[in-house]
């Protein structure tokens, strides 16, 4: 049976291009209909050309069409992927610039803290609209979300539309496992692990190389090889202190706790040096997006000139679709789902990132028990803040948003309660056109 896969926010060129390539690499999905939808006609036209190239060079019997109509893309779809961004840099720059005025130094700002919460408040409205359309146009579809802030968005959608077969996906788990394997000299396929927590704040509670505990080797690499330590300074400091390795990059992790960004001397010590993907430079992601505003067309043009590698990548989505919609080969991944008896010492009903099994039976999240207490304390604080922010958005209650940000560890480390109130008021004012849930 030919399947239909809809991409909402298809103008996210890198994500869509790679995911389409992966999906079509599975024999059972090679004749799929790929429905591309975006609100930007220029980016939509570019990704349509890219997908047509993948189909042509792979000699796949697939069909690709592009549309500005979301419901047309979703109608009778078997699978849905969202990779949306609500507002351009002129909108979300305030997530980073306003907190900086109050001493809250942000590197990425797409997950938690004042920047992540306001990104959530803007993004939750269109994502709920998409979820509503899924329930009407393709209620049995497998819905996979890549949009951040992952935990709060998935928690809201899964709470409002619990009937949907859905999970949120992030590449930090498999990406970090490959990095750790490299550090100890293992091949990626030789390591296995159990990973649990919340998105961007999960930990490997077990990391094995050929069935044996690899943590002593990881500790040896971090403490004895400067090039390894400097590659991920923040994460390595967290590992040495907490005993378990976190999944997300140092730049991200530096924002989620009070230890690294509350003073300039700490920022210069922990957040600027390093050779990793994102050591922690202030406004890193804003600078990246500003640059892409003027270079994305050149990058796409270059992609069409380069040879095309059709090899399957490591993103989870295609494997999940194949397990449920394709040949039925089961696939275990780390997904974002609500905590109904999965992690015993994180808040009931919050969004957790845990092992999930995809098969012809759908998605089955796996109980992992208790996190080590030092990890539950860190992730549990963030999860409770996220729960408060979600409830505040659903209720249209500005005070609940303020109170959630009051408890953000980094914000609380540098701001008084009155300063936080002023910052939040300023952020509401900058975002008022994008927040219809607050009257």
Image: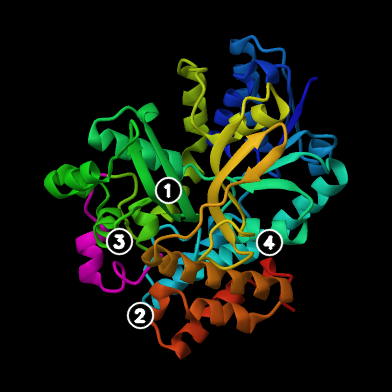
393 or 188, nearer to the observer: 188
Residue 111's spot in the image, x, y percent?
50, 60
Please name whichever residue, 4 or 110, is drawn nearer the observer in this view of the structure: 4
The kind of secondary structure element at disc 4 is helix
Disc sitting over residue 156 in the figure: 4
As for residue 226 lying within the magenta part, the answer is: no
Please name whichever residue, 189 or 27, is drawn nearer the observer in this view of the structure: 189
**Residue 404 image-quadrant placement:** bottom right
| Residue 362: % across, % down | 71, 38
In the rendered image, the quadrant that contains the N terminus is top right
The residue under the point 65% across, 19% down is 52
Above or below, comparing residue 413 to residue 59 in the picture: below
Tell me if residue 367 comes above or below residue 81 in the rendering: below
Q: x and y percent of residue 307 in the render?
A: 46, 15
In this rendering, the label closer to the viewer, 2 or 1: 2
Query: Do the residues under discs 3 and 4 have CB atoms within 8 angstroms?
Result: no
Q: Which circle, 3 or 1, is nearer the viewer?
A: 3
From mark 2 to mark 4, how far is it between C-alphas? 29 Å
Residue named by callout 1:
288
């Amino acid at each position: 049976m030919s399947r239909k896969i809809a991409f909402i926010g298809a103008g996210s060129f890198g994500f869509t291009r790679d995911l389409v390539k992966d999906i079509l690499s599975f024999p059972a999905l090679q004749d799929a209909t790929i429905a591309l939808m975006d609100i930007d006609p220029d980016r939509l036209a570019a990704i349509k050309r890219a997908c047509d190239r993948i189909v042509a060079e792979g000699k796949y019997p697939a069909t690709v069409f592009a549309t500005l109509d979301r419901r047309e893309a979703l109608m009778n779809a078997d699978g849905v992927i969202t990779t949306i961004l609500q507002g351009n840099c002129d909108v979300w720059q305030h997530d980073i610039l306003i907190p900086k005025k109050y001493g809250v130094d942000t590197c990425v700002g797409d997950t938690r803290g004042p920047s992540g919460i306001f990104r959530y408040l803007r993004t939750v409205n269109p994502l709920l609209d998409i979820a509503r359309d899924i329930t009407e146009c393709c209620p049995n579809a497998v819905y996979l979300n890549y949009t951040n802030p992952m935990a709060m968005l998935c928690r809201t959608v899964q709470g409002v539309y619990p009937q949907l077969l859905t999970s949120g996906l992030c590449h930090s788990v498999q990406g970090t496992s490959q990095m750790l394997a490299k550090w100890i000299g293992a091949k990626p396929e030789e390591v296995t692990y159990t990973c649990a927590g919340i998105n961007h704040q999960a930990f490997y509670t077990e990391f094995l190389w050929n069935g044996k505990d690899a943590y002593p080797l990881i500790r040896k690499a971090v403490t004895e090889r400067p090039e390894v330590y400097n590659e991920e300074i923040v994460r390595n400091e967290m590992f040495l202190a907490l005993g378990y390795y976190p999944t997300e990059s140092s730049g991200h992790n530096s924002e989620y706790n009070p230890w690294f960004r509350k003073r300039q001397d700490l920022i210069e010590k922990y957040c600027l040096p390093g050779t990793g993907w994102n050591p922690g430079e202030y406004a890193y992601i804003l600078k990246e997006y500003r640059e892409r505003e003027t270079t994305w067309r050149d990058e796409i043009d270059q992609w069409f000139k380069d040879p095309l590698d059709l090899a399957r990548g490591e993103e989870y989505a295609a494997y999940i679709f194949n397990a449920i919609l394709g040949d039925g080969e089961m696939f275990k991944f780390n997904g974002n789902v609500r905590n109904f008896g999965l992690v015993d010492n994180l808040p009931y009903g919050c969004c957790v990132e845990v092992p999930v099994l995809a098969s012809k039976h759908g998605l089955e999240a796996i109980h992992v028990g208790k996190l080590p207490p030092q990890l539950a304390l860190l992730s549990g604080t963030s999860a409770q803040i996220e729960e408060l922010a979600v409830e505040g958005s659903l209720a249209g209650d500005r005070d609940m948003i303020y109170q959630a940000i009051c408890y953000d560890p980094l914000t609380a480390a540098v701001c008084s309660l009155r300063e936080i109130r002023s910052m939040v008021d300023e952020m509401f004012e900058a975002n008022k056109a994008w927040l219809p849930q607050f009257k």
